[in-house]
Amino acid sequence: MIKKGRIRRQAALLTALGMLFVSSCGGSGGTSDSGAAAEQDTEQTLMAEDSASGEAANIEEDITDTIPLNVIDDNYRTYYEVFVYSFYDSDGDGIGDLQGLTSKLDYINDGDDTTDADLGCNGIWLMPVHPSPTYHKYDVTDYYAIDPAYGTLEDFQAFLAACGERDIKVIMDLVLNHTSSGHPWFQEACAYLRELGDGEPDTAQCPYFDYYHFTKEPASGYSQVSGTDWYYEAQFWSEMPDLNLGCEELREEIKGITQYWLDMGVGGFRLDAVKEYYTDNVPDNIEFLRWLTNTVKSQREDAYLVGEAWANISSYSQYYESGIDSLFDFSFAGAEGVIAKVMNGSPADKYGTAVAELDETFGQYNENYIDAPFYTNHDMARSVGYYVGENSDSRVKMAGAMNLFMSGSAFLYYGEELGMRGSGKDENKRAPMYWSKNADAEGMCDGPADMDDFEMKYDSLEEQEQDEYSIYRYFRKAIKIRNQNPEIARGKAEYLAEVSSDRVCVLRKTYEDSELLLVFVTGADTESVDLSGLSLNGHPVDDSTQTRAALVTGEEQITVEKGIAKMPGYSVLVLK
């Protein structure tokens, strides 16, 4: 039963929001001065009503339905990682393709701020789409083309145009540590060495010789050029020869590649294996990354670059010295990351203190850094496998919110919003997007050939769309909250230990002149959180009208009375 106080609050807020929409420039921008004043006046009215009623405010999840989006067009975004091969098949060959992805863009973001049917992601990270002999395509044979299995260059251009209409920024995977052994550069270099005999290589005759690391001294991570006594570096696999990124001619090639795709409309690049550019040589890795960042930024000022440096935080934080926008924040990701540990019983302060320390950790190298929190990716077991037993579905949901509510550009791997399974071999982690339980349904992909046969734990999208308590609906709500409150992505975080506890984490985020509180309950039990001693934006935290969102994993709701929040297990309260 909805209390009368709730009805009054919602009616008054809707009145104010009508004023906001009349006075604002649109759902994607900030509110005008008059709109902000209307919202403030309404909050004061609601505070007076609640004070008069003396009732505890029962905060329902749909409070977010009364708040407009405030999506800022900058490089703080919510990215959706897509493996085209397994996403959506438009031509019935079992392999996902660009036309299929384009047809499902409304699932990711329909471009209409007034609808609630899309995820609300405003960025897409495309795993490699260049021609390649492998299904994953991390060994490129042509940096200027699209793999025929995915479609044509025209298909890619149509995809970019459709993304542009929805204000989705597209970043491409750019693999520069190595090429495919089938790349013409490598093929020509090897052919030259076979013809050379005992002579000395001359880059004037074959410039591609200098594009790779060739030597006559065998070493760890080197493979032999067949028919010769030459070896080449290939740290990942013999069919992925490492590039010599110190070669100036190669750097000119790379400059041309980035310019080509940026000119086409790509918004930036995800940089694969940045700590492997020069084997065991951090200073040279940083130098190349600095050169690449400066190059790309000179070509497109608002281009976004995010690097993969799979290491501990003290190691990958150094790479911010290059000036790169973002580095994936591995310390929070995976089964051994901060989030999973807290969801599996570690104290809540492990998350709170780790989040609050990021600004100092990264900021010492680059004050303009943008963190890139992610929870899983194509190389990791899917998160549903991290939790078993009681409350496992609640922990899957809550972990997703803890990732999405971190500052920076948050990344979501396709299918995580459905609780897809996938562990063990890499192919299992890249299973077909679970649109339907019917494997023969329109658009369903076959998945990688060597993928094991396994069943999903949770329903497909078809069922989850209709279930208000599904993982999908939870993720959609969490992203909506992120899009409504710019402080979540852009705010500097402060951990409030004095009001936190073993299973409660309270964070204050400050962005420009606005403050926001995030209150996380990380255990199964209901918690009473006394926030009455805190101030927020110059006012005491003593009334539920400051509530921006209440995110719960089940039916039990959050209540707030006189600054004391009663919160069910695995829930999040957002105050502003």
Image: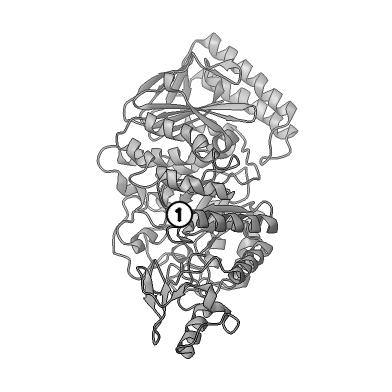
Q: Which percent across, then down, holds residue 267?
A: 63, 56
Rendered position, 533 above or below 227: above
Q: Secondary structure at mark 1?
A: loop
Between 58 and 190, the residue placed more toward the observer is 190
> From this viewpoint, which residue is outermost toward the left?
389
Q: Say if residue 12 shows up in the picture.
A: yes
Quarter of the image for the C terminus: give it. top right
Rendered position, 292 above or below 542: below
Q: Say if residue 105 shows up in the picture.
A: no
Q: Is residue 565 left or right of residue 42?
A: left
Q: Residue at x 61, y 38 (%)?
A: 69
The image quadrant that residue 354 belongs to is top left
Q: Which percent across, then down, holds residue 371?
A: 52, 43
Count the numbered circles shown: 1
Q: Residues within 10 Å of mark 1 (few under 14, many from 20)?
A: many
Q: Which residue is mark 1?
A: 414
Between 90 and 533, the residue placed more toward the observer is 533
Quarter of the image for the N terminus: give it. top left
Type of colouring: one colour
Q: Residue at x 56, y 58 (%)?
A: 288
The image quadrant that residue 408 belongs to is top right
The amino acid type of the residue labelled 1 equals: Tyr
Q: Which percent across, then down, holds residue 55?
A: 48, 13
Q: Which percent across, then down, holds residue 567?
A: 40, 24
Between 257 and 571, the residue placed more toward the observer is 257
